[in-house]
Amino acid sequence: MLDLKALRENPDQFKKALAKKKVKSEPLDQILQLDTKRRELMPEVENLQAEINKISKDIPKSDAETRNKLVEKSKELKEKLKEFEPQLAELEAKQYDILAGIPNIPHDSVPEGKDENDNVEVKKWGVIPEIKNPLDHVELGTKLDILDLDRATKITGTRFAIFKGAGAKLERALAAFMLDRQTAAGYTEVIPPYLVNAESLYGTGQLPKFEEDLFKIPFNDTHFYLIPTAEVPVTNIHRDEILDGTKLPIRYCALSPCFRSEAGSYGKDTKGIIRQHQFHKVELVSFTAPEVAEEELERLTGNAEAILEALELPYRKITLCGGDMGFGSHKTYDLEVWIPSQNTYREISSCSWFSDFQARRAAIRYKSESTKGKTQLVHTLNGSGLAVGRTWVAVVENYQQPDGSILVPKVLQPYLGGLEKISTN
């Protein structure tokens, strides 16, 4: 959520910054108009409350006649207050609702642009394998009997998968390898809940704007949501807390299933397991002080890149332009891995710096000597380290052999009992 005080003091700066995300200025104008009305009404309410409080203190000290007059006066003032308080509450609620739907402002270094075509490539790594007539992962997985989409569709529906035999072991090996590498890089592994409440989704910015993308589960007199990413529960570990600034940055990693309705994506990536309703992902989350947050973004992104490089998978790193950035993002790098059957790079990780946008919504603060004992909002960051299913696709396709077998990357072989090749033999 944006800083209302800062918006009030410099609205033109916010309008200019959000224009980079293709956000119109009208919602900001509405917030400021409501804020003006609210600030005009506030003194009336505060003065009435102060007068009522003063009368309450004077009543016990007064004689009977004065006491009766004060009681009557207090009743009159309370009736007046009843008229103003609902008006104030309505203004605040409207203002808050609009503010909750406005995205984060982009960092100055974020490039201008309308969509993914305007993203900027900043790095390319690895050698693209020379594969004549590459098969896609569905053909390879079906022939090797390690992937079954038809039976998954029978069990649940489209965009679900069954990994079998060596395919299931490869998925598990990739996840274990990623967790081992990320914990060695300084992340504390956690296993969070996979169902979360609305407050948690609000804190990270998925609610109220993106509810249609979520799976909602009724439960007794309330409801939960299946997590779209471990970012949600892991970021909310420290919701409503004041952290010890000397212990920052705090870094977590988590393997979890992710559940997404993929609303609005019908017809996109319907073949295979690139875009699923359920998939596994290792998530990296960091809480840090503002002055080192940009450096932390580079570190976190590097931790995700290290997985691709260890697996020797060709990839590229791009900076997202303003028009292609996520709702809460201040700056985002996408990592895209080479997919031979598509003859292109596809996203496998998105690493974002949220500035204090999530922390303001979730009330995550810190205190240290550098803040002179005052509480200050942390900066949050997260990224995929990596999406396990898409890494599975990349390994299967990039390591395919002419006979239809798949070589196992050297770093994964210890996780697969020394297995060097997946084949029908």
Image (cartoon, grey):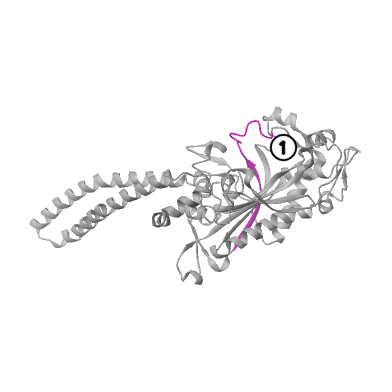
Q: In this view, does 245 lie above or below 137?
A: below
Query: Which residue is drawn at the image coordinates 76% and 38% (left, top)?
Result: 342
Percent position (x, y) of residue 8? 39, 54
Percent position (x, y) of residue 253? 65, 54
**Residue 27, quarter of the rendered image:** top left
Q: Quadrant of the C terminus?
A: top right
Q: Please indicate, yes or no, whether residue 1 appears anywhere in the rendered image.
A: no
Helix, strand or loop status at disc 1: loop
Q: Is residue 340 left or right of residue 322?
A: right
Task: Please state the extent of the stretch shown in magenta in the rendering.
Answer: 249-269
Q: In the current view of this chain or complex, which residue is farthest to the left?
A: 65
The amino acid sitting under disc 1 is Ile
Query: Which residue is drawn at the image coordinates 59% and 34% (left, top)?
Result: 264
> Which of 235 and 262 lies nearest the eye of the viewer?
262
Percent position (x, y) of residue 413? 84, 51
Mark 1 sits on what residue? 273
Does the magenta run of residues contain 248?
no
Instruction: Mark 1: give few (<14), some (14-19) or many (20+) Cα within 10 Å.
Output: many
Q: Please indicate, yes or no, whether residue 338 appears anywhere in the rendered image.
A: yes
